């Protein structure tokens, strides 16, 4: 733990003096100078840091990640409840003309765009209310992942410099993810698009930009529009555990020969596709065949729980 933070911890609870820490103020002064040296305009730096403050909650969240390990049997019903499926289907129908246009442009099935939107922010309802510059500066100052959060902070300043959002509206999660599809600043700069051509990449309020940016992210990472993401399967007890994991890839016909079947017991599809067999939980947990698009979704979020939730919701939309 960085010494400057340890001095401000009292019985495991952050002291209220943290917000007024001279050390944080000095750190911010250094950030501002670095930003100017990096070419960020003085006007942007002044506006971005005008209301800078230390966000104690961001440090608490960062240091107290949940330790309780869910299983997919518990997580998926929570992440993809029936009400969310119903809402996803309704929104899919409501925005189908726009989704279809974007899906064709980027080669991404619209149901996956809606599924990502639903899992990330409950269709734009839960985008986070943390001031991003303050949160990122706080996490950089705290020091556990200083290089990462400092890099994200400077990327965030570039977003402000380019005029895509105002400092007052520049809000997101405690860790810096923002907008209706929760891009980190680095992902925003790499993948966000001005889908409607209004001169701004608005991931907070413009659904064309939201959908287009999500689709562009998948496209740029190798999405295949002629394939799905994966499927839940039954695995015989006799299967060699060494065959589990994303490192092993086999044709579906090979998995069929090894006794792997669809969840309902039927044969695997007779198509020429490579797949890996994964079991995110223990030997008694759910098993899935993961296709190439599963790997693309892992670029977005490496958690197998996240990927399975997105894939499950996408499947439910199409039912």
Image (cartoon, rainbow, N blue to C red):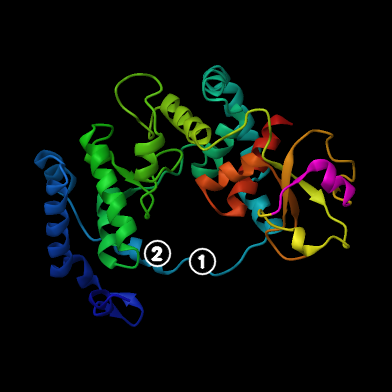
User: Camera-side residue: 265 or 256?
Assistant: 256
Q: Is residue 214 visible?
A: yes
Q: Residue most toward the bottom? A: 11
Q: Residue 33 has which mark? A: none
Question: Dividing the image into 4 quarters, which one contains the N terminus?
Answer: bottom left
User: Camera-side residue: 120 or 26?
Assistant: 26
Along the horizontal axis of the image, is 122 left or right of 50? Answer: right
* Residue 257 counted in the magenta span: yes
Question: Dividing the image into 4 quarters, which one contains the C terminus?
Answer: top right
* Residue 293 counted in the magenta span: no
Depicted 269 relative to depicted 261: above or below: above
Along the horizontal axis of the image, is 190 left or right of 15? Answer: right
Q: Residue 66 has which mark? A: 1
Q: CA distance from mark 2 to mark 1?
A: 10 Å
Q: Which residues are magenta?
A: 248-258
- Give the residue displayed 59% in from the left and 37% down from the top: 115
Along the horizontal axis of the image, is 64 left or right of 142? Answer: right
Identify the element where label 2 is drawn. Answer: helix
Instruction: Give the residue pinned by disc 2.
Output: 62
List x then y, in percent, for residue 110.
Answer: 59, 27
Quadrant for residue 197, please give it: top left
- Give the residue displayed 24% in from the left and 40% down from the top: 158
- Give the residue displayed 87% in from the left and 52% down from the top: 258
Depicted 176 relative to depicted 83: above or below: below
List x then y, in percent, for residue 128.
Answer: 39, 47
Q: Residues within 10 Å of mark 2 (few under 14, many from 20)?
A: some
Identify the element where label 1 is drawn. Answer: loop
User: Camera-side residue: 68 or 183?
Assistant: 183
List x then y, in percent, for residue 113.
Answer: 55, 32
């Amino acid at each position: 733990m960085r010494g400057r933070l340890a001095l401000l911890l009292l019985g495991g609870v952050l002291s209220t003096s943290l917000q007024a820490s001279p050390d944080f103020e000095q750190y911010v002064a250094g950030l501002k100078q670095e930003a100017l040296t990096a070419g960020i305009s003085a006007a942007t730096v002044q506006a971005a840091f005008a209301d800078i403050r230390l966000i104690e909650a961001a440090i608490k969240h960062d240091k107290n990640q949940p330790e309780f390990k869910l299983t997919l049997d518990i997580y998926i019903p929570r992440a993809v409840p029936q009400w969310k499926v119903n809402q996803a289907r309704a929104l899919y129908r409501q925005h189908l003309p726009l989704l279809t246009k974007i899906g064709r442009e980027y080669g991404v099935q619209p149901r996956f765009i809606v599924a990502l939107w639903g899992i990330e922010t409950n269709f734009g309802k839960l985008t986070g209310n943390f001031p991003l510059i303050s949160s990122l500066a706080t996490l950089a100052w705290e020091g556990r992942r200083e290089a990462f959060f400092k890099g994200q902070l400077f990327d965030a300043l570039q977003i402000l410099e380019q005029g895509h959002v105002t400092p007052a509206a520049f809000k997101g999660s405690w860790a810096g993810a923002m907008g209706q599809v929760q891009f980190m600043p680095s992902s925003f700069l790499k993948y966000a698009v001005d889908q409607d051509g209004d001169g701004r990449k608005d991931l907070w309020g413009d659904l064309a930009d939201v959908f287009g940016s999500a689709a562009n992210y998948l496209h740029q990472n190798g999405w295949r529009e002629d394939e799905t993401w994966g499927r839940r399967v039954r695995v015989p007890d006799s299967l060699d555990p060494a065959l589990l994991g994303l490192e092993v890839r086999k044709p579906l016909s090979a998995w069929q020969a090894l006794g792997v079947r669809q969840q309902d017991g039927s044969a695997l599809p007779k198509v020429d596709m490579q797949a890996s067999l994964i079991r995110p939980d223990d030997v008694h947990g759910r098993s899935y065949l993961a296709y190439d698009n599963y790997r693309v979704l892992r670029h977005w979020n490496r958690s197998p729980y996240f990927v399975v939730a997105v894939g499950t919701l996408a499947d439910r939309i199409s039912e």
